[in-house]
Amino acid sequence: MRISVKPSLRESFAVSHIVAIAALTLIVWSVYWVMKALFPFTESLSGPAVSVVVYIATAAAIRGVPASSPAFDTADLLTSVIALAYVLNALVSLAAAWALTRWVYGPGSLRALKSLHVSFRRPYI
């Protein structure tokens, strides 16, 4: 008498590499959200990253701390809140990728994807 044992969901995901592709997609999304937070309006290049670069360039040019900084108005507050939402989206995406790969493969996202990279590159015969 032969007993067939169905593989668990975790084993099925590990064999089919679905989790690796999903984790890679989530990591790409998190990079996208971080870039969106740093440069919210790419056509005009304004945002927190550009403001920091301008401040540092001004401080380096005058060799000191700039005496007057631009006022923090409502538009800057709104941009900061939107940037914070984008950063939270990035953190949630990274946490989901980590949890998914931790459940299936054991190690963290990048280590699991790095170890699977070798198996993706092998030619199928």
Image (cartoon, rainbow, N blue to C red):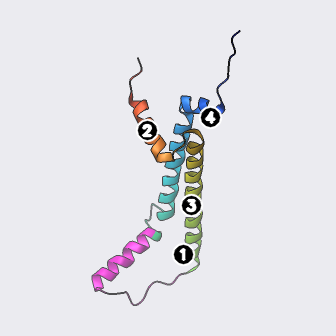
Q: Which residue is mark 3?
A: 86
Identified by mark 1, the residue type is Asp
Q: Which residue is mark 4?
A: 10
- In front of the other: label 2 or label 3? 2
Identified by mark 4, the residue type is Arg
Q: Is residue 99 above or below residue 77?
A: above
Q: CA distance from mark 3 to mark 4?
A: 31 Å
- Relative placement, left or right, of 82 versus 34 is right
Residue 111 at x, y percent in the picture: 45, 45
Tell me, yes or no, whether the two marked residues, 3 and 4, touch with CB atoms within 8 Å: no
Q: CA distance from mark 1 to mark 3?
A: 15 Å
Residue 39 seen? no
Identified by mark 2, the residue type is Ser
- In front of the other: label 1 or label 3? 3
Image quarter of residue 16: top right
- In front of the other: label 4 or label 1? 4
**Which label is found at residue 9?**
none
Q: Nearer the viewer, residue 46 or 101?
A: 101
Tell me, yes or no, whether the two marked residues, 2 and 3, touch with CB atoms within 8 Å: no
In terms of sequence position, does the residue under pointer 1 or pointer 3 come before the other?
1
Q: CA distance from mark 2 to mark 4?
A: 17 Å
**Magenta residues, start to end:** 49-72
Q: Which residue is mark 2?
A: 115
Secondary structure type for disc 1: helix
- Relative placement, left or right, of 25 versus 54 is right
